[in-house]
Image: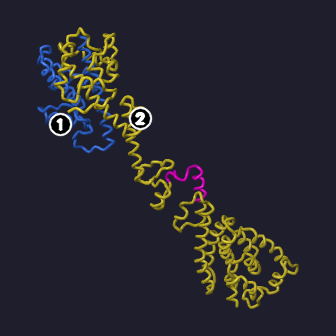
């Protein structure tokens, strides 16, 4: 009956009353019964009476870790403990078997409390958890040490093994509770290998809560990720071997997308440079349109070179070498501006069709051929000639005139 | 045509100065060959072509092999010297034979645009000078 009663709460009660209980054999029956009948009996030892309160308070409070020390300190655990366990509830009665050995009784208390703590956590809820986890960790370690010193009773061994098994599950349950309690910071929690104890877990969580307050879930920065799949799922930055690029908010951070992002940033940077080179492209957003504009600009520049070389070909180059030197020096010195050139010809009009078809920007720079210039008449003749000669897509002078600022000409040869 | 020795006119031999010296040398050489006034349109056209090629070549030589587009142009000049290479093909369609990803292509385009603008600027100034002087 004792063995049956050991497994049931109800039977625990009976076992207490039952004088066949080996526990009762150990304990002073009188004290036990008196204890049992009246919670605070005068006939009981003042030691008991005084000791009862702390145990009651111990029961009600959840600092079971402290309770173990208290009980061991007071030393009357053997008589009070069954009642303690009863109040706690489900904690199995199997521990009663432990009470057979007095010397081991005290040591067993913390172990059992740890066991009870684990069950309590399920019963009471996450409230008790912080203490529970700490208490459990402490007790668990202490219990294991003390368990080794226990007498070699078969039940002891079984108890230890049971507790070892159960110890793992409360541990997991603890962790799970922690996970539910701290839902913000917990993505690594369940993926942690089960080697971590609750204490370490708690510190980890607190640390993580701190970091979580600073950063959003996605931009965790350079945290160590234990599994490769976590990085893709949780969006953490797994970079430890590569250049540390902090993931920006709301962006995926696995290695492929990061390299992609770097590449895209390089490309957009160059597109911005090109935007500055090509005039009139400040408002254009979008790479395709920008590329179109760039292509047109390059084509128009090439055509300008052609026009200018044609102009040079028609100009009478009555230059001697001295003039050339002067010219080159002049060109070099007056780098950016055509101001010097324009100053010579203040009131010249643009000559069509050559220049008017070109950009307005360039037109201003080209002072036009004066009617008095010798090349001018040949140019008018040349215009018609050019239409025949140039099969390069200069369809007609009118077509050239109709060129917009960066007009789209048919490509040349 | 491009055998004029490079003369550095200012301490910092920039792309512009290199181009100027080369091009002017070529230009004088071309224009010295036949007078303008008595030229027929065909001659003028030929001269135009030569000047254009000279301009492009000057620029390509000024850049030398530092850029992919200049390398492509130089190789094309050397291989197809006799053929009429009218209009330079766009950089994007050039058969440079080198691996060009988007990033490098954009780099090359930016540099090419810069060189083209330099070319246009210098040539325009020369034209103006010609117009001014006579």
Asked whether B13 or B28 is in front, the reply is B28
Q: Is residue B29 visible?
A: no
Residue at 69% across, 80% down:
A105
Name the tint of chain B in the rendering: blue
Q: Which residue is mark 1?
A: B75
For residue A411, above or below residue A12: above
Q: Is residue A78 left or right of residue A291?
A: right
Region of the chain picked out in magenta, as a range: A204-222
Name the tint of chain A in the rendering: yellow
Return the x and y of residue A63 as percentages of the image width and height: 71, 67
Q: Is residue A375 visible?
A: yes
Q: Which residue is mark 2?
A: A284
- Residue at mark 2 shares a chain with residue at mark 1: no
What subunit carries mark 2? A
Residue at 57% across, 60% down:
A186
Q: Secondary structure at mark 1?
A: helix
Return the x and y of residue A108 as percentages of the image width and height: 67, 78
Query: Quarter holding the N terminus of chain B?
Result: top left
Asked whether A392 or A129 is in front, the reply is A392
What subunit carries mark 1? B
């Amino acid at each position: 009956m004792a063995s049956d009663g050991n497994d049931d709460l109800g039977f625990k009660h009976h076992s207490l009353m039952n004088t066949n209980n080996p526990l009762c054999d150990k304990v002073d029956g009188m004290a036990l019964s008196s204890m049992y009948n009246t919670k605070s009996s005068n006939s009981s030892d003042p030691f008991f009476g005084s000791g009862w309160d702390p145990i009651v308070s111990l029961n009600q409070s959840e600092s079971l870790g402290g309770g173990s020390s208290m009980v061991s300190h007071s030393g009357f655990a053997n008589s009070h403990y069954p009642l303690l366990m009863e109040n706690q509830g489900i904690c199995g009665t199997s521990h009663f078997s432990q009470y057979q050995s007095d010397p081991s009784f005290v040591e067993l208390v913390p172990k059992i409390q740890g066991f009870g703590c684990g069950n309590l956590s399920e019963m009471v809820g996450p409230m008790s958890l912080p203490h529970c986890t700490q208490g459990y960790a402490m007790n668990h370690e202490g219990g294991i040490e003390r368990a080794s010193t226990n007498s070699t009773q078969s039940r002891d061994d079984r108890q230890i093994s049971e507790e070892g098994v159960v110890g793992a599950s409360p541990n997991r349950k603890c962790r799970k509770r922690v996970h539910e309690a701290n839902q913000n910071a917990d993505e690594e929690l369940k993926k942690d290998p089960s080697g971590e104890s609750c204490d370490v877990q708690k510190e980890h969580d607190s640390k993580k809560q701190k970091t979580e307050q600073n950063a959003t879930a996605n931009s965790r920065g350079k945290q160590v990720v234990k599994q490769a799949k976590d990085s893709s799922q949780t969006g953490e930055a797994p970079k430890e071997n590569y250049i540390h690029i902090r993931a920006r908010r709301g962006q995926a951070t696995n290695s492929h997308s990061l390299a992609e992002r770097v590449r895209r940033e390089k490309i957009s940077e160059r597109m911005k440079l090109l935007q500055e080179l090509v005039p009139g492209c400040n408002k254009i957003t979008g790479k395709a349109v920008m590329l179109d504009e760039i292509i047109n600009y390059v084509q128009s520049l090439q055509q300008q070179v052609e026009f200018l070389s044609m102009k040079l070909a028609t100009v009478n180059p009555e230059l001697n070498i001295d003039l050339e030197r002067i010219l080159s020096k002049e060109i070099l010195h007056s780098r950016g501006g055509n101001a010097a050139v324009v100053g010579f010809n203040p009131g010249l009009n643009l000559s069509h069709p050559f220049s008017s078809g070109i950009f307005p920007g360039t037109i201003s720079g080209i002072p036009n051929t004066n009617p008095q210039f010798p090349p001018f008449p040949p140019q008018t003749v040349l215009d018609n000639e050019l239409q025949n000669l140039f099969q390069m897509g200069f369809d007609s002078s009118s077509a050239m005139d109709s060129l917009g600022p960066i007009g789209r000409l048919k490509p040349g040869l | 045509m491009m055998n004029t020795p490079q003369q550095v006119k200012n301490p910092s031999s920039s792309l512009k100065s290199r181009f100027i010296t080369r091009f002017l040398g070529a230009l004088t050489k071309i224009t010295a060959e036949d007078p303008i006034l008595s030229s027929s349109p065909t001659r003028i056209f030929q001269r135009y072509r030569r000047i254009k090629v000279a301009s492009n070549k000057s620029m390509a030589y000024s850049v030398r092999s530092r850029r992919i587009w200049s390398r492509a142009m130089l190789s094309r000049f050397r291989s197809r010297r006799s053929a009429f290479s009218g209009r330079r093909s766009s950089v994007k369609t050039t058969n440079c034979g080198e691996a060009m990803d988007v990033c490098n292509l954009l780099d090359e385009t930016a540099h090419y645009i810069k060189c083209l603008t330099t070319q246009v600027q210098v040539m325009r100034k020369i034209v103006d000078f010609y117009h001014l002087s006579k």
